[in-house]
Image (cartoon, rainbow, N blue to C red):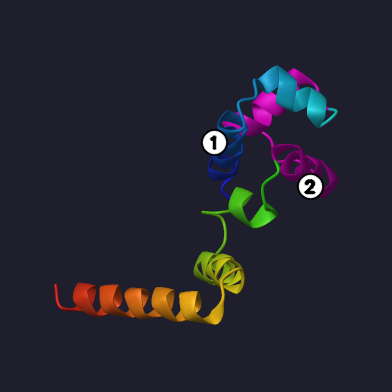
Amino acid sequence: MDKKALGANIQKYRKQKGLTQDQAAELCNLSTNYFRQIELGNKVPKLETFLRIAEALNVSTELLLEGNLSWTAEIRSNELYKKLEELDPSQQKFILDTVSTLVDGIKKL
């Protein structure tokens, strides 16, 4: 596991949520020092702690693990699928046609 990537992802989502390390640590029921060590990539949290961090930051565990997994592309496709499910069929077709056109254009580069 790339501890630095995990820590960087946690830090990224903590900052997006507008939390300080102290606030995030408190939400996770962790010491600020331990939380800081996780963000720096010096410590890897236990599974239970990792899940509390994801919950406190309101972010999926997959996103926190991004850069650590060989199946990141599968995760992204699942996220895209979830977004598409929110749309009606005509909107889904529009998005898929647009993506298809973009992919075809990129292949020609």
Q: Which residues are magenta?
A: 30-57
Q: Quadrant of residue 106?
A: bottom left
Give the mark nearer the N terminus: 2 vs 1.
1
Q: Residues within 10 Å of mark 1 (few under 14, many from 20)?
A: some
Residue 10, position as x, y percentages in the image = 61, 38
Name the residue: 42% across, 73% down: 95
Three-letter amino acid code of the residue under disc 1: Lys
Q: Which residue is mark 1?
A: 12
Task: Tell me: residue 50, above or below residue 71.
Answer: above
The answer to whether residue 53 shows anywhere in this view is: yes
Q: Nearer the viewer, residue 77 or 81?
A: 81
Residue 38, position as x, y percentages in the image = 67, 33
Magenta segment includes 36: yes
Name the residue: 54% across, 36% down: 12
- At mark 2, the secondary structure is helix
Q: Quadrant of residue 74?
A: bottom right
Q: Which residue is mark 2?
A: 51
Q: Quadrant of residue 16?
A: top right
Residue 102, position as x, y percentages in the image = 27, 73
Task: Tell me: residue 20, above or below residue 28.
Answer: above
Q: Nearer the viewer, residue 19 or 70?
A: 19
Q: Nearer the viewer, residue 109 or 66?
A: 109
